[in-house]
Amino acid sequence: MPQDLTVDSVSYRYPSGSRDALHDVSAEFAAGSCTAIMGATEAGKSTLLQALTGVIGELDGGVLSGRIRYGAADLADYRVQTLTQYIGLVLQDPASQIIGRTVGEDVAFGPRNHLVPRAEISRRVAQMLELVGLSGFEARSTAELSGGELQRLAIAGVLAMGPEVLCLDEATAELDPVGAGRLREVVASLRQRGMTVVTAEHDPAAVLDQASGIVVLDAGQVAWQGAPADFFADPDRVERLGIRPLPMSVVARGMLRERPELALTLPVGRRLPLTVAEMSGWLRDLLPAEPRPHPPAPSAQGTGRPVIEIDDLHFGYSPRAEVLHGIHLTIRAGEFVALTGPNGAGKTTVAKHLNGLLRPTAGRVLICGRDVSGRPTWQLAGQVGYVFQNPDHQIFCRSVADEVGFALRVAGRPQAEISARTTAVLQFTGLTDLCEANPLTLTRGQRQLVAMASTLIAEPEILVIDEPTTGQDWRGVQAIMDLVDRLNQQGTTIVMISHDRELIAHHARRVVTIDGGRVVADGPVQTQVTTQLGELWQQCFGGRPDSCDEITAGRRLVQSCGART
């Protein structure tokens, strides 16, 4: 039977750490509850989850103080092997905990190591795969699974141990909206069965929808805890703690800054609206009865010269497994294009053809009018910069300055030119003060900026960025996207791969959707992406907003409001 999980004055320092990763943290996770752990990068979210499962301290040699109790039991009195039967942990990267060759083998691994009888193992495997929506996958190779399927398999493997508490570390961070939705359905099903869920989560809408409580960490300390609605009702505090605010709270904040007297019209309790339903309910008596006509959608494409031309592109990672089936796409100079679509659709595969990392099986790819066939990747890199989803895949020098200047050194450019251009790029990306730092000591957001800077040193005409905000806190997202916007304003063509609808709506002007290795939609962002602001506008005005910016939208709504206050 699930018990309360209690954290009492817990501090923890990693073996090589200069400060506490957790400092005097106290929190209680009630049996059967769903609690979200939120905070900026390196706030201590993953460390706290690992502390709850007994992983840190025992396995890595760090210094742990305070008490963590499950019911009356002190976790310090038990080995990790025992604790896994009560408290399970699913990591952000599911591949790091997938062990079996097949789906069935992987789910059976934990129970088998605990000497569970074979018949019971078979029952658990079938039950857990059904629970996560993977029934019938028992014999399938784990190497063939999509990111969303791997994440659900990781959960099934943990659940097969029979835990009463499930800890999830950013489990939806790399999933498309459909995959994330399915995973949240699994979590909801587990809660209905009485399981306690503790999840590190970056999506404020998901937290508001699913969590019964929230613990916010800042620099390893508890900065806030309570009900999610109470936390998100103060968007200034949310942003100050490095967390993305809810769009409707930002719109409402903008309205109240323009006309403070509108606060008197808020519902009882004076809390800001947080959802589209709450916002439209508040506005119902403030807006005119006759909806305003909505502006026509702008043209889907830019008017500059073509810089990317993809003609009937086919590609397969093996002769029998074609993943791109006749892609046709033209992107013009200065455009900001988002490539979106489900996990495994072929977005990254298409993008890797732009700089020669992959070569077509059939069809052709032209960059600035020249076919990429026969052109080496190093030469294409001068025209097409590519920033990987994981910045650690392209960082290997011992200092930020060396990393940024690496491409010019390899190209044999004079040292004076290397120094001048490195200094300029460091200043442009805001990395000047970190020029001597080892990139591996930086935050994920800072490493992403380093990866971008090392790409920009070649002055590419086209920049491809793959999921640039994965693993980033709100401050990191803002810093990266501010840089990308400035590049686009200066004429750089941007191709951004992303699942984030709100991010796409705020920055891209055109959206290309790829599914099943084909382009299935292509048009302006206003017609291709549905955001919370778009839903609100549809309900209030029967059309689309002419801006995806919540602050601008707040001003427009104030202008539309009647005098009833």
Image (cartoon, helix red, strand yellow):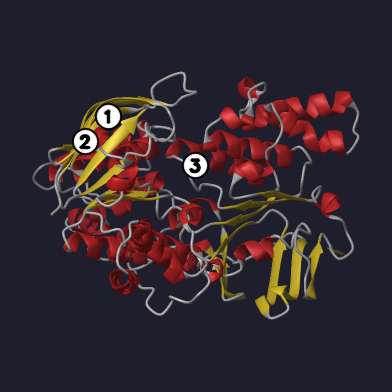
Measured Cα–Cα span from mark 2 to mark 1: 7 Å
Q: Are marks 2 and 1 in contact (CB under 8 Å)?
A: yes
User: Could you tell me which residue is drawn at 43 percent across and 26 percent down?
Assistant: 14
Task: Between residue 273 and residue 109, name the one nearer to us.
Answer: 109
In percent of width and height, residue 467 lies at 55, 52
Residue mark closest to the camera, 3 vs 2: 2
In percent of width and height, residue 154 lies at 41, 59
Q: Amino acid at mark 3?
A: Val
SS label for mark 3: helix
Relative placement, left or right, of 436 versus 274 is right
Q: Which residue is mark 1?
A: 222
Q: Amino acid at mark 1?
A: Val
Q: Which quadrant does the C terminus fall into?
A: top left
Q: Amino acid at mark 2?
A: Gln
Residue mark closest to the camera, 1 vs 3: 1
Q: How many marks?
A: 3
Residue at the left extreme? 268
Q: Which labelled disc corresponds to residue 477?
A: 3
Tell which circle, 3 or 2, labels the residue nearer the N-terminal end. 2
Measured Cα–Cα span from mark 3 to mark 2: 24 Å
Q: Which labelled disc corresponds to residue 225?
A: 2
Q: Which quadrant does the N terminus fall into?
A: bottom left
